[in-house]
């Protein structure tokens, strides 16, 4: 309930806010007045409007406070008098200048993964230093259908960027031979990636800088990880992660940006919307979507089935209604009929989730006709599969990926 008028709550009526805490303010400091109260906290908001001090007991930044965004705008624009200059065009201009100042005439190497962050970092650095940038794209054989050719056409053909394409699939498959455990697979993929990256980058001369698509949540996450307090559920090895002892200096132009900002600047830089708005894809790729040992023939099935699922989601206008969707390959066989004969073939599971932060997620209630269409296409078009299932597990207790 609003208690007295203020510029913070300008033109607002009593509002719903999200509060969850054990402590509360019991007495207002000198010079302050109570702006709002609630049955649980007599002092829900307070201010000393002469000195411009404001205090809230609730969370304006969460989605559970529906008018929180307006409150933050009042605070920033009316009270602090800042102007909204954090636009994609300004971010790009500032980042381009910073990259130029940072690297000067040196050469820069960047590992392109096919994901949004490294793509945007590449486009940005290319805008800043052009031919001084060399990108390396390592195909680990665990990518999505046609991903390698899409990366090459987007960056090399359409933008004229220098991209070295390393087809290292056989090396990765060999490193994964006989490896069953998900964490061991992540480590094998990560280690192989580093070895290949080191080997290939040693062939280039005159590179001083290594560029990475590190974004702000990665910075926070690695700060959290370094305290050792977080319980490791998955090592989340990002294949882009490189050892610290490399002899390059680091260029990370997206370090201070959130994902939605990275996407906006990607679009403003003219990257294709399909790439910029794509669902996240784990660093180890299909390596954690093929349960147990990874074999090239399993990857082929998983990749083709996944492409059918994703195409269908686009066709039914559901791709952007879910946060992440993919196919998981199960190395178990089930009985089916093909023509008049008994078949005995593999199982795949479709997975689609809705989430805002990927820490918790609910399975997506996709329409039956969409699921029927995917299932028919997978069973008719891909040999080696006898059953298509749909995963109806939310996180927790399940995780989004199956491994
Ligand atoms: P989980 O399976 O932990 O996934 O619920 C949460 C999000 O993280 C992604 N994920 C990974 N990303 N390397 C990555 O770069 C990994 O090893 C990895 N494992 C899971 C997953 O796709 C989802 O978006």
Image (spheres, grey):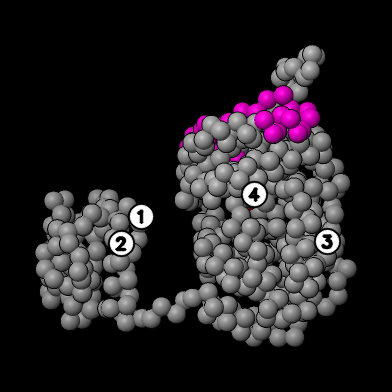
| Residue 28 in sight from this viewpoint | no
> Dot 2 surroundings within 10 Å: few (below 14), some, or many (20 or more)?
many
Give me the disc on residue 346.
none
Is residue 396 within the magenta segment?
yes
Q: Is residue 146 above or below residue 198?
A: above
Q: Which residue is mark 4?
A: 282
> Real-space Cα distance between discs 4 and 3?
20 Å
Instruction: Indicate yes or no: mark 2 CB to ligand 1 under 8 Å.
Output: no
> Dot 3 surroundings within 10 Å: few (below 14), some, or many (20 or more)?
some
Give me the disc on residue 165.
3
Q: Helix or strand or loop: what does disc 4 sit on?
A: loop
- Image: magenta residue range: 376-401
Report the front residue among 287 and 77.
Answer: 77
Looking at the rendered image, the disc whose residue lies closer to the viewer, 4 or 1, is 1
Picture quarter with the C terminus: top right
Instruction: Indicate yes or no: mark 4 CB to ligand 1 under 8 Å.
Output: yes
Instruction: Indicate yes or no: mark 3 CB to ligand 1 under 8 Å.
Output: no
- State which tag comes first along the sequence, 2 or 1: 1
């Amino acid at each position: 309930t609003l208690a007295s008028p203020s510029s913070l709550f300008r033109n607002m009526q009593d509002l719903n806010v999200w509060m969850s805490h054990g402590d509360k303010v019991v007495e207002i400091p000198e010079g302050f007045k109570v702006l709002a109260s609630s049955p649980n906290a007599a002092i829900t908001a307070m201010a000393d409007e002469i000195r411009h001090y404001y205090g809230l007991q609730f969370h304006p930044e969460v989605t559970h406070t529906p008018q929180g965004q307006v409150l933050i705008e009042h605070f920033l624009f009316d009270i602090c008098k800042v102007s909204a200059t954090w636009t994609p065009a300004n971010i790009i201009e500032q980042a381009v200048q910073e990259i130029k100042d940072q690297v000067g005439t040196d050469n820069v190497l960047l590992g392109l993964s096919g994901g949004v962050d490294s793509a945007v970092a590449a486009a940005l650095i290319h805008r800043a230093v052009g031919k001084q940038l060399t990108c390396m794209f390592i195909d680990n054989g665990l990518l999505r259908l046609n991903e390698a050719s899409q990366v090459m056409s987007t960056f090399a053909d359409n933008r004229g960027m220098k991209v070295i394409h390393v087809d290292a699939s056989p090396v990765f498959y060999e490193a994964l031979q006989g490896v069953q455990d998900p964490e061991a697979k992540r480590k094998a993929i990560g280690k192989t990636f580093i070895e290949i990256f080191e080997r290939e980058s040693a062939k280039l001369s005159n590179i001083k800088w290594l560029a990475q698509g590190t974004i702000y949540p990665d910075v926070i996450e690695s700060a959290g990880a370094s305290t050792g307090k977080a319980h490791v559920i998955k090592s989340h090895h990002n294949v882009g992660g490189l050892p610290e002892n490399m002899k390059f200096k680091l260029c990370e132009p997206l370090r201070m940006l959130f994902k939605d900002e990275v996407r906006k600047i990607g679009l403003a830089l003219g990257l294709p919307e399909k790439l910029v708005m794509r669902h996240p894809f784990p660093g180890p790729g299909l390596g954690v979507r093929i349960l147990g040992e990874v074999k090239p023939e399993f990857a082929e099935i998983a990749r083709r089935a996944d492409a059918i699922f994703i195409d269908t989601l686009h066709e039914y206008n559901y791709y952007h209604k879910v946060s992440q969707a993919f196919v998981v390959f199960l190395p178990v066989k089930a009985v089916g009929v093909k023509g008049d004969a008994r078949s005995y073939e593999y199982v795949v599971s479709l997975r689609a989730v809705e989430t805002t932060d990927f820490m918790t997620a609910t399975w997506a209630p996709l329409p039956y006709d969409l699921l029927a269409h995917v299932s028919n296409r997978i069973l008719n078009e891909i040999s080696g599969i006898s059953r298509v299932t749909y995963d109806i597990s939310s996180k927790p207790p399940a995780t989004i990926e199956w491994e």
